Image (spheres, helix red, strand yellow):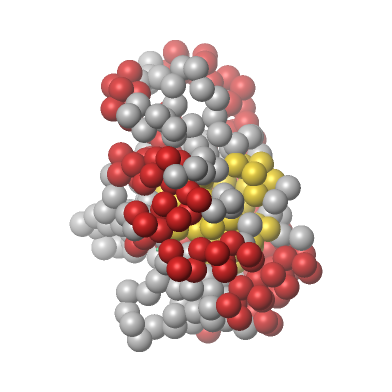
Amino acid sequence: MNARWNGQFSCFDLVAKTDDCSPVTVTVGDLEIGGGDFIVMAGPCAVESEHQIMQTAEAVAAAGARILRGGAYKPRSSPYSFQGLGVAGLKLLRKAREATGLAIVTEVMSEADVDVIAEYADLMQVGARSMENFSLLEALGRCERPILLKRGLTATLEELLRSAQVIAMSGNQQIILCERGIRTFETATRNTLDISAIPVLKAVSRLPVIVDPSHAAGVRSLVPMLARAATVVGADGLLVEVHPSPEHAMSDGDQSLTFAQFRNMMVDLQPYLALQEDDRRHRPRLLVAGGAD
Ligand code: PEP
Ligand code: MN
């Protein structure tokens, strides 16, 4: 392990990796994240209708996803954009879970909504725009659900871990970190996927790390390639936007995969997952040989 990184982050004692602590595995329903299985979470940006969420849940479950995503409360850059269905959306997510057995991840934007969302969600998502909403993080620390913490648009990894530490200090260490692209000077993609964030976070923190290639890319054609990159650098899973008819989506249609594209992506990932598995088995030898640590 890189001594400087370890020193730099060790102040985040509950979430930092130290020589005498084991990695955190996060339990979501009957799934374990961070324990070696690669878990894919997929679904629309926003829950729009019963038909849309049920169809999507069936399709992503059939392709191998284990968790259904879908926002009922949407943080939007424009106040004129679709804001989500609220509790009606949460009820549709529950119905989709009953039909498919998929666990549910959905975003919580406000401290006031924590209790109601915890009634419906298996995993509570903190969006990039809320990463430093400390009263929300503290409330999530007190709730008895695992947390998916997304990296802020301009947040350093230290700031991401600081937010994780706030949740952990409030009583909840069941936290998954999510790299979803950061804002840089580059405009060809919606955000810049910081691929090195994954091995760095895996080296300095005890928490599982997943990648959201959809918000990083902003265009669906790049999503499968970024997903592949995430698997080979050691991510514990993915969060991917999928929509039955992306051109009609009420939010983030340009970056949403069709069902067929999602299915293909899942099949194409298999050899890369095998590589990751192989890398895990040989990790000590490879690190010494590469001299990278
Ligand atoms: C989302 O997952 O739909 C979302 C709003 O993501 P982010 O917070 O990463 O922008
Ligand atoms: Mn989205």
Is residue 3 in view from this perspective? Answer: yes
Total numbered labels placed on residues in the image: 0
Outermost left residue: 185
The residue sitting at 43% across, 64% down in the picture is 111
Picture quadrant of residue 240: bottom right
Give x and y (percent) for residue 142: 50, 51
The residue sitting at 68% across, 63% down in the picture is 60
Image height check: is 214 above or below 279? below
The residue sitting at 57% across, 81% down in the picture is 48
Q: Quadrant of the N terminus?
A: top left
Outermost bottom residue: 80
Image height check: is 233 above or below 107? above
76 and 39: which is toward the camera: 76
Give x and y (percent) for residue 172: 51, 44
Picture quadrant of residue 98: bottom right
Q: Quadrant of the C terminus?
A: top left
Give x and y (percent) for residue 246: 54, 77
Give x and y (percent) for residue 278: 62, 27
The residue sitting at 68% across, 54% down in the picture is 66
